[in-house]
Image (tube, rainbow, N blue to C red):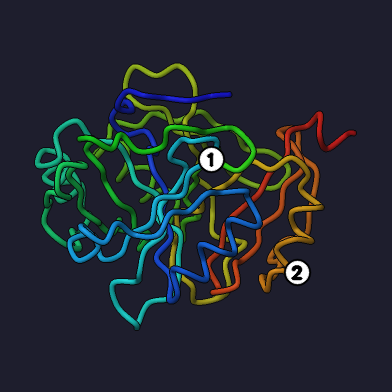
Amino acid sequence: MPTRDDAWPAGTPNWVDLAADDPQAAAEFYSQLFGWDVADPDPETAEQTGGYRMAMKNGRAAAGIGSKMGQDIPSNWATYLASDDIEASAEAVKAAGGTLQMDPFDVMTFGKMFFATAPDGASFGVWQAGDHIGAQIYNEPGSYNWNEVHSRDLDAAKEFYASAFGYTYDDMSGEQGPYFGFKVPGGDEPVGGMGPADMLPEGAPSIWLAWFSVEDCDASVAKVQELGGSVLAEPFDTPFGRMSVVTGAQGEAFGMISAPAAAEA
């Protein structure tokens, strides 16, 4: 079981959380879909954390669920990128042409963070670990295993993240179009990807899409529909596994993938 107890390398997608209209309903949805154990907010810190819920898988932090910051935005999954110096990361984002949605701030003793918007319009978070390192479980059914940008301006996105986070790219393009895996400084393997926004509805902004591992993609898609979600991309096979893009019951998009061995079983 891939787990982690130390802070993630800078630039690595290190956390995902859901901003929902109804966090309690979302907790019930994902508990049934991914087998998460989502505890109720701690009454002693609920006011400070906005009722944020921690989703656990096999006793380890897998994702977060909280309330939306405003009613004018849809429910959405956010990807966070690791930082070892939150103030320096904020300055790098601005210097590269990004816009801060808020200045860096402390989240009690858990860590430090800010949200930003890239020049292509994609929103993302940046997290510097404190007591909370981010994901403690990954690449395991019921946990996230990949994060990727679907960009309206792929060249601008690549340039921005290279400048702000030091990314370099592996060209993974194929029959389905251009696609680039990004590597953090000193990294040998891609930790996420970037491609065009062909799958997005017309007029939708660029997004970071979070992918979750599942045992059986088709069964998980059926479960999403049973729980009130919908299918954006029906299950299809790739060299990396069988995958699908869906939305939760509150409209938030995410991907699911089962390993190639599971897809062939």
Q: Quadrant of residue 31?
A: bottom right
Q: Give the vertical position of 76 relative to 209 (above or below).
A: below
> For the residue marked with disc 1, what is the amino acid?
Lys
Viewer-side residue, 91 vs 145:
145
The residue that label 1 is drawn on is 57
Q: Residue at x 34, y 59 (%)?
A: 41
Whole-percent x, y for residue 204 in the image: 48, 72
The C terminus - image quarter = top right
The N terminus - image quarter = top right
Q: Residue at x 45, y 65 (%)?
A: 76
> For the residue marked with disc 2, what is the amino acid?
Glu
**Mark 2, residues whose alpha carbon is within 10 Å: few (<14), some, or many (≥20)?**
few
Q: Is residue 261 left or right of residue 76?
A: right
For label 2, the SS is helix
For label 1, the SS is strand
Q: Is residue 165 left or right of residue 203?
A: left
Q: Is residue 161 left or right of residue 86?
A: right
Q: Residue lying farthest bottom?
A: 72
Q: Residue at x 11, y 56 (%)?
A: 103
Q: Which mark is residue 226?
A: 2
Q: Give the vertical position of 209 relative to 230 (above or below).
A: above
Foreground mark, 1 or 2, reads: 1
